[in-house]
Image (spheres, rainbow, N blue to C red):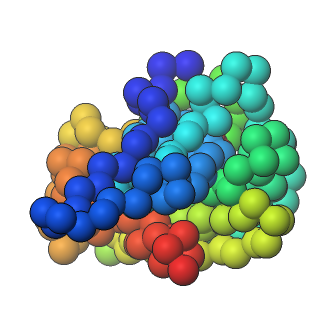
Amino acid sequence: MGGPEMAPHTPQRSGRPGEAVAPLDTLNRRVVLATLNPGKLRELARLLGDLPIELLSLADIPGATLPEETARTYADNALLKARAAQRLTGCAALGDDSGLEVDALGGAPGVHSARFGGAGLDDAGRVALLLERLRAVPAAKRTARFRCVIALVDEGGGEHTVEGVAEGEIAAAPRGASGFGYDPVFYYPPRGRTFGELTEREKEGVSHRALAARAARALLSG
Ligand code: ITT
């Protein structure tokens, strides 16, 4: 899989002149990102990369797989992923389960966003199918939201979940090439552009994942 470069992140610490600097080993907590989606990995690494922890990616562990997402809620699916990665590595683990909820489709694809239209479709195919399903739906009724739940399973098996939501609309056609998944058709009114037209930094300021990651940061630092 062509994931982002996820060499373990080593925090840098410098003390004031004359001040003792704690050895990095005592600061380093290893946290594994329990996702195999390269777009998510890149975003989570950017959102959490400055924390004084060593971030590892499940994608870098040969043969690592994630359990089937059999649960009906984002939180339970995120926990399934985080538990699996925590058991595999012994490290604290973060699982992300996310999806796009389209009001005109009764909240679909929701937790099934990654599998919308079946296993044969790629991101572009899922976007095309979504636009086809919404062909007759006027602009005012194309409201939608991205939801992201991040689960933390710590070294001792303690579990926490946090959530972030970004409200928007489904555009008439794809626009922009950044991000991943449904980003090119997720129009975000406060910026007047789709997520696919935002820079990584702009998406980090407003996205569902950024909001959830902000709450996850508090859990990791607490
Ligand atoms: P992992 O299970 O390995 O984490 P996945 O892609 O299977 O990866 P999900 O089951 O959580 O993950 O599926 C979420 C889907 O929702 C994802 O594949 C995208 O299609 C879509 N999605 C989630 N966040 C998104 C974002 O920020 N931008 C665009 N699409 C997103």
Nearest the camera: 122 or 87? 87
Residue 35 vs 207, above or below: the answer is above
Q: Name the image quarter holding the C terminus.
A: bottom right
Percent coordinates x, y for residue 216 in the rendering? 52, 71
Asked which quadrant contains residue 98, the reply is bottom right
Nearest the camera: 144 or 73? 73
- Residue 138 in sight from this viewpoint: no
Asked which quadrant contains residue 56, the reply is top right
Percent coordinates x, y for residue 104 in the rendering? 52, 68
x 40%, y 60%: residue: 22
Q: Name the image quarter holding the N terminus.
A: top right
Percent coordinates x, y for residue 128 in the rendering? 45, 36
Residue 211 vs 127, above or below: the answer is below
Q: How many marks?
A: 0
Nearest the camera: 72 or 116? 72
- Residue 41 in sight from this viewpoint: yes
Judged left or right of residue 90, residue 60 is: left
Percent coordinates x, y for residue 4 in the rendering? 42, 29
x 67%, y 54%: residue: 93
